[in-house]
Image (cartoon, helix red, strand yellow):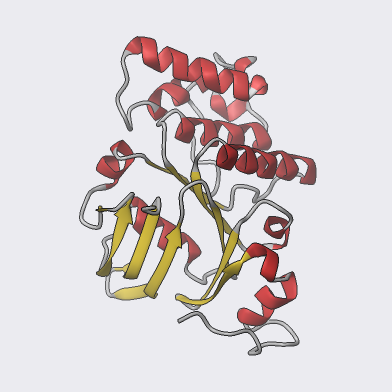
Amino acid sequence: MTPALEIRGVRFGYGDLTAVWDVSLTVPRETTVALVGRNGAGKTTLLSGVAGLLRCQSGSVLLEGDDISKLPAHTRARRGLSFVQEGKRILRELTVRENLVLGTFGRPASRKDAKALIDQMCTRFPPLAEKLEQPAGALSGGQQQMLAIAQALVNRPSLLLLDEPASGLAPVVVDEVLALVSELKREGLAILIVSEGGEELLSGVADEVAVIDQGHLVLTAAAHEVTAEDITAAMGIGPDSGTVPVAR
Protein backbone atom coordinates (compact mmCIF):
# COMPACT_ATOMS: atom_id res chain seq x y z
CA MET A 1 0.00 0.00 0.00
CA THR A 2 1.25 3.47 -0.87
CA PRO A 3 2.29 5.31 2.32
CA ALA A 4 0.60 8.54 3.31
CA LEU A 5 3.95 10.32 3.39
CA GLU A 6 7.33 9.38 1.97
CA ILE A 7 10.34 11.63 2.52
CA ARG A 8 13.31 10.73 0.33
CA GLY A 9 16.76 12.16 1.07
CA VAL A 10 15.54 15.70 1.70
CA ARG A 11 17.56 18.73 2.67
CA PHE A 12 15.90 21.80 4.13
CA GLY A 13 17.32 25.01 5.52
CA TYR A 14 17.22 28.76 5.74
CA GLY A 15 19.03 30.68 3.03
CA ASP A 16 22.55 29.25 2.75
CA LEU A 17 22.18 27.32 6.01
CA THR A 18 21.16 23.66 5.71
CA ALA A 19 19.46 22.42 8.89
CA VAL A 20 18.18 19.00 7.77
CA TRP A 21 20.48 16.66 5.86
CA ASP A 22 19.50 13.75 3.60
CA VAL A 23 16.58 12.60 5.75
CA SER A 24 14.39 9.73 4.58
CA LEU A 25 11.28 8.77 6.50
CA THR A 26 7.99 7.01 5.77
CA VAL A 27 4.63 7.51 7.47
CA PRO A 28 2.27 4.66 6.52
CA ARG A 29 -1.46 5.24 6.36
CA GLU A 30 -3.34 5.05 9.66
CA THR A 31 -0.04 5.26 11.54
CA THR A 32 1.43 7.69 14.06
CA VAL A 33 5.16 8.36 13.80
CA ALA A 34 6.83 10.31 16.60
CA LEU A 35 9.74 12.50 15.49
CA VAL A 36 11.90 13.05 18.56
CA GLY A 37 14.96 15.20 19.14
CA ARG A 38 16.55 17.90 21.20
CA ASN A 39 15.80 21.58 20.77
CA GLY A 40 17.42 22.69 17.52
CA ALA A 41 17.83 19.16 16.17
CA GLY A 42 15.85 19.92 13.01
CA LYS A 43 12.37 18.66 13.91
CA THR A 44 10.44 21.83 13.11
CA THR A 45 12.56 22.45 10.02
CA LEU A 46 11.65 19.02 8.68
CA LEU A 47 7.93 19.52 9.30
CA SER A 48 8.03 23.01 7.80
CA GLY A 49 9.73 21.63 4.69
CA VAL A 50 7.21 18.83 4.32
CA ALA A 51 4.38 21.37 4.67
CA GLY A 52 5.91 23.56 1.96
CA LEU A 53 6.96 26.47 4.15
CA LEU A 54 10.61 25.86 3.23
CA ARG A 55 12.10 25.12 -0.18
CA CYS A 56 13.28 21.56 -0.74
CA GLN A 57 17.00 21.91 -1.50
CA SER A 58 17.28 18.30 -2.61
CA GLY A 59 15.39 15.05 -2.36
CA SER A 60 11.64 14.66 -2.64
CA VAL A 61 8.42 14.62 -0.61
CA LEU A 62 5.60 12.31 -1.70
CA LEU A 63 2.03 12.59 -0.43
CA GLU A 64 0.05 9.42 -1.11
CA GLY A 65 2.50 8.60 -3.90
CA ASP A 66 2.45 12.01 -5.60
CA ASP A 67 5.59 14.16 -5.62
CA ILE A 68 4.68 17.46 -3.92
CA SER A 69 8.26 18.70 -3.47
CA LYS A 70 7.80 21.76 -5.66
CA LEU A 71 4.22 22.60 -4.72
CA PRO A 72 3.45 25.66 -2.56
CA ALA A 73 2.04 25.19 0.93
CA HIS A 74 -1.55 26.07 0.00
CA THR A 75 -1.57 23.47 -2.78
CA ARG A 76 -0.27 20.82 -0.38
CA ALA A 77 -3.12 21.73 1.95
CA ARG A 78 -5.60 21.19 -0.88
CA ARG A 79 -4.04 17.77 -1.41
CA GLY A 80 -4.86 16.82 2.18
CA LEU A 81 -1.86 17.88 4.28
CA SER A 82 -2.53 19.85 7.46
CA PHE A 83 0.18 21.34 9.68
CA VAL A 84 -0.38 22.39 13.30
CA GLN A 85 2.61 24.56 14.16
CA GLU A 86 4.08 24.89 17.62
CA GLY A 87 2.81 27.74 19.77
CA LYS A 88 -0.94 27.56 19.13
CA ARG A 89 -0.82 29.44 15.82
CA ILE A 90 -4.34 30.79 15.79
CA LEU A 91 -5.64 34.29 15.06
CA ARG A 92 -6.38 35.46 18.58
CA GLU A 93 -8.32 38.57 17.56
CA LEU A 94 -10.81 36.52 15.54
CA THR A 95 -13.59 34.47 17.08
CA VAL A 96 -13.36 30.72 17.49
CA ARG A 97 -15.88 30.31 14.68
CA GLU A 98 -13.90 32.57 12.34
CA ASN A 99 -10.73 30.59 13.01
CA LEU A 100 -12.54 27.39 12.10
CA VAL A 101 -13.95 28.95 8.93
CA LEU A 102 -10.41 29.89 7.91
CA GLY A 103 -9.44 26.25 8.25
CA THR A 104 -11.91 25.28 5.52
CA PHE A 105 -10.09 27.51 3.00
CA GLY A 106 -7.34 24.91 2.60
CA ARG A 107 -9.73 22.62 0.77
CA PRO A 108 -12.65 24.85 -0.22
CA ALA A 109 -16.09 23.67 0.81
CA SER A 110 -19.59 24.96 0.17
CA ARG A 111 -21.15 27.03 2.91
CA LYS A 112 -23.33 24.07 3.87
CA ASP A 113 -20.36 21.68 4.00
CA ALA A 114 -18.26 24.20 5.93
CA LYS A 115 -21.02 24.52 8.53
CA ALA A 116 -21.20 20.73 8.82
CA LEU A 117 -17.43 20.54 9.32
CA ILE A 118 -17.55 23.19 12.04
CA ASP A 119 -20.44 21.37 13.71
CA GLN A 120 -18.28 18.22 13.72
CA MET A 121 -15.49 20.11 15.48
CA CYS A 122 -17.95 21.41 18.05
CA THR A 123 -19.04 17.84 18.75
CA ARG A 124 -15.44 16.68 19.04
CA PHE A 125 -14.36 19.67 21.15
CA PRO A 126 -17.29 20.69 23.41
CA PRO A 127 -15.34 23.55 25.10
CA LEU A 128 -15.04 25.22 21.70
CA ALA A 129 -18.76 24.86 21.03
CA GLU A 130 -19.47 26.89 24.14
CA LYS A 131 -17.21 29.74 23.00
CA LEU A 132 -17.75 29.95 19.25
CA GLU A 133 -18.42 33.67 19.28
CA GLN A 134 -15.65 34.58 21.71
CA PRO A 135 -12.21 35.84 20.62
CA ALA A 136 -9.79 32.96 20.31
CA GLY A 137 -7.30 34.87 22.45
CA ALA A 138 -9.68 34.57 25.41
CA LEU A 139 -9.39 30.78 25.44
CA SER A 140 -7.18 28.91 27.88
CA GLY A 141 -3.89 27.50 26.58
CA GLY A 142 -5.37 24.03 26.27
CA GLN A 143 -8.42 25.33 24.46
CA GLN A 144 -6.23 27.31 22.06
CA GLN A 145 -4.39 24.11 21.21
CA MET A 146 -7.74 22.39 20.69
CA LEU A 147 -8.68 25.18 18.29
CA ALA A 148 -5.41 24.91 16.38
CA ILE A 149 -5.97 21.18 15.90
CA ALA A 150 -9.65 21.67 15.03
CA GLN A 151 -8.69 24.28 12.45
CA ALA A 152 -6.37 21.71 10.85
CA LEU A 153 -9.02 18.99 10.92
CA VAL A 154 -11.67 21.02 9.09
CA ASN A 155 -9.27 20.86 6.14
CA ARG A 156 -10.22 17.14 5.96
CA PRO A 157 -6.59 15.98 5.88
CA SER A 158 -5.24 12.54 5.14
CA LEU A 159 -1.92 13.54 6.76
CA LEU A 160 -1.59 15.61 9.93
CA LEU A 161 1.69 17.19 11.03
CA LEU A 162 1.78 18.15 14.72
CA ASP A 163 4.69 20.22 16.04
CA GLU A 164 5.00 19.91 19.84
CA PRO A 165 1.21 19.87 20.40
CA ALA A 166 1.66 19.29 24.15
CA SER A 167 4.19 22.08 24.70
CA GLY A 168 3.38 24.36 27.63
CA LEU A 169 0.21 22.53 28.60
CA ALA A 170 -0.81 21.16 31.98
CA PRO A 171 -0.32 17.38 32.37
CA VAL A 172 -4.07 16.68 32.29
CA VAL A 173 -4.38 18.61 29.02
CA VAL A 174 -1.36 16.77 27.59
CA ASP A 175 -3.21 13.52 28.27
CA GLU A 176 -6.24 14.86 26.40
CA VAL A 177 -4.13 15.88 23.40
CA LEU A 178 -2.41 12.49 23.21
CA ALA A 179 -5.76 10.71 23.55
CA LEU A 180 -7.00 12.79 20.62
CA VAL A 181 -3.98 11.76 18.54
CA SER A 182 -4.78 8.10 19.19
CA GLU A 183 -8.43 8.68 18.27
CA LEU A 184 -7.53 10.42 15.01
CA LYS A 185 -5.27 7.53 14.01
CA ARG A 186 -8.11 5.07 14.64
CA GLU A 187 -10.26 7.19 12.35
CA GLY A 188 -7.77 6.70 9.52
CA LEU A 189 -5.39 9.66 9.71
CA ALA A 190 -1.65 9.34 9.23
CA ILE A 191 0.15 11.50 11.79
CA LEU A 192 3.71 12.78 12.13
CA ILE A 193 4.07 14.26 15.62
CA VAL A 194 7.11 16.11 16.97
CA SER A 195 8.27 15.89 20.57
CA GLU A 196 11.44 17.06 22.28
CA GLY A 197 11.47 14.28 24.87
CA GLY A 198 9.35 11.48 23.49
CA GLU A 199 8.70 9.53 26.67
CA GLU A 200 4.99 10.31 26.67
CA LEU A 201 4.71 9.14 23.06
CA LEU A 202 5.95 5.64 23.77
CA SER A 203 2.96 4.63 25.89
CA GLY A 204 0.64 3.49 23.15
CA VAL A 205 0.36 6.70 21.13
CA ALA A 206 3.13 6.26 18.56
CA ASP A 207 3.47 3.23 16.32
CA GLU A 208 6.95 4.20 15.21
CA VAL A 209 9.68 6.49 16.53
CA ALA A 210 12.27 8.43 14.55
CA VAL A 211 15.07 10.29 16.33
CA ILE A 212 16.73 13.28 14.68
CA ASP A 213 19.94 14.88 15.88
CA GLN A 214 21.92 17.72 14.30
CA GLY A 215 19.78 17.50 11.19
CA HIS A 216 20.34 13.78 10.63
CA LEU A 217 18.03 10.87 11.33
CA VAL A 218 19.91 8.67 13.82
CA LEU A 219 17.33 6.06 14.78
CA THR A 220 14.09 4.64 13.43
CA ALA A 221 12.24 1.80 15.13
CA ALA A 222 8.86 0.44 16.11
CA ALA A 223 7.75 2.24 19.26
CA HIS A 224 7.38 -0.97 21.25
CA GLU A 225 11.00 -1.88 20.52
CA VAL A 226 12.64 1.20 22.05
CA THR A 227 12.79 2.79 25.49
CA ALA A 228 13.28 6.37 26.62
CA GLU A 229 16.89 5.40 27.39
CA ASP A 230 17.39 4.24 23.80
CA ILE A 231 16.15 7.59 22.56
CA THR A 232 18.41 9.68 24.78
CA ALA A 233 21.35 7.45 23.86
CA ALA A 234 20.63 7.96 20.15
CA MET A 235 20.67 11.71 20.74
CA GLY A 236 24.03 11.39 22.46
CA ILE A 237 22.87 12.57 25.87
CA GLY A 238 22.40 9.33 27.80
CA PRO A 239 24.80 7.12 29.74
CA ASP A 240 24.71 4.59 26.90
CA SER A 241 25.35 7.16 24.20
CA GLY A 242 26.53 5.58 21.00
CA THR A 243 25.13 2.09 21.64
CA VAL A 244 21.97 2.50 19.55
CA PRO A 245 22.27 1.52 15.88
CA VAL A 246 22.19 4.42 13.45
CA ALA A 247 19.44 4.33 10.84
CA ARG A 248 20.78 3.92 7.29
Looking at the picture, how far across and down is residue 3, in whole percent? 40, 54
Tell me where residue 185 sits by quadrant: top right
Tell me where residue 39 sits by quadrant: bottom right
The single residue placed furthest to the right in the displayed view is 172
Quick check: 228 left or right of 208?
right
The single residue placed furthest to the front in the displayed view is 1
Visible residue check, residue 91: no
* Screen quadrant of the C terminus: bottom left
Visible residue check, residue 177: yes
Looking at the picture, how far across and down is residue 205, in whole percent? 66, 51
Looking at the picture, how far across and down is residue 48, in whole percent? 39, 56
Identify the residue shown where x is 22% and y is 50%.
71
Say above or below: 141 vs 29. Answer: above
Looking at the image, how many numbered discs can be counted on the residues?
Answer: 0
**Closer to the camera in the image, 90 or 244:** 244
Looking at the picture, how far across and down is residue 122, in whole percent? 58, 19
Identify the residue shown where x is 58% and y is 85%.
245
Quick check: 84 left or right of 55?
right
The single residue placed furthest to the top in the displayed view is 112
Identify the residue shown where x is 20% and y is 56%.
70
